[in-house]
Amino acid sequence: MKVPLVTPIIGSLFALLMQADADIYVTNFNSLNGGSGATGVWRNITTATDLTTAVSLGKSDGMVQPQDGSEHESRIDDLFQWRDDTVHFTSLFEPNFDGDFINVAAATGVSATVIIGFNAEVVDPTLHFTDIGPQTTLQFLTSSFVKTGGLSNMEISGVTVSSSGDTVPLMMGTTDSTLGSLKFTGTFTALIFTITNSGSDPIADLDYTGFVVSTEEPPVSLLPPPELTVSVEGDVVTLDWGTAGAFSEIQMLNDSSEWVGVIGTDPAGTSSYEGSKTVFGPTRLFRGIY
């Protein structure tokens, strides 16, 4: 008797449907540093678990808004809903989750560089932003990104994202601002971009934009750089770098202001070196190459 083929097919489909979605990791800011920036940690939203890897946001101009209940506040309570427009069946953000955002205010005439530091290697991060008016642009260091969610008036030209200025439906009203999600391709340790406000009305054209980053790959924490310590006792100079292999070469600045290898050091095989101060000569600067 032959076994019907439908059985393994149904089993395979069932197993496929039961597979869990990938975890989502987001920048979970929990502290605002006045109006200058914000700090926090990566958070696994799927498991509601904070990681130990730090995140930060800083900027060259503009103002980070406080969390004060106002219309343009920053949100660091894990409760902001990065959700779609269910009224118009429009995908605004991808992926959807509840999280934070840091709201950066850019006045007219301001061009502010924003750095969201990951303190980790992050694969294919997605930047979500709440809105930019037609007078404002976002300019990135790379064009390796695509729109994964957002309003139809979002325009992408090379490294620049802007609003066309067209009025489009949003929730229960309309807007000429744009918002959405941009997914970058590659491995990043930070996202760096510039907010430029070309508006002329200092009140009506003041731009407020909230930002958060997500990824579906676990952030890989960056190792701190190795340290080279120098100590002197009598005529003995000791160079210590803690672990064999931490550096590929130990160098010093010679009399000609050139960096040269310290003769006799073996950073690959040892973790320290002792030499005579009279051999090194006058005060020297040392460095480790890794």
Image (tube, rainbow, N blue to C red):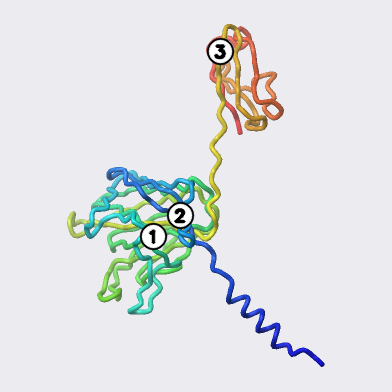
Residue 215 location, x and y as percent? 49, 59
Residue 210 location, x and y as percent? 33, 57
Under mark 1, the amino acid is Gly
Under mark 3, the amino acid is Val
Residue 136 location, x and y as percent? 30, 58
Q: Which mark is residue 99?
A: 1
Give the mark, 3 or 1, whose residue is nearer the N terminus: 1
Residue at the spot of label 3:
232
Which one is closest to the eye, mark 2 or mark 3? 2
Residue drawn at x 82%, y 93% as measured from the top left: 1
SS category of the residue bearing label 2: strand
Q: Residues within 10 Å of mark 2 (few under 14, many from 20)?
A: many
Give the mark, 2 or 1, whose residue is nearer the N terminus: 2
Q: Residues within 10 Å of mark 1 (few under 14, many from 20)?
A: many
Under mark 2, the amino acid is Arg
Q: Are marks 2 and 1 in contact (CB under 8 Å)?
A: yes
Q: How many marks?
A: 3
Q: Which mark is residue 43?
A: 2
Q: Residues within 10 Å of mark 3 (few under 14, many from 20)?
A: few
How far apart marks 2 and 3 lie (CA) works out to 45 Å
**In the displayed image of the protein, which residue is found farthest to the bottom?**
1
How far apart marks 2 and 1 lie (CA) works out to 9 Å
SS category of the residue bearing label 1: strand
Horizontally, residue 27 falls left or right of residue 290, namely left
Give the mark, 2 or 3, whose residue is nearer the N terminus: 2
Position of the C terminus by quadrant: top right
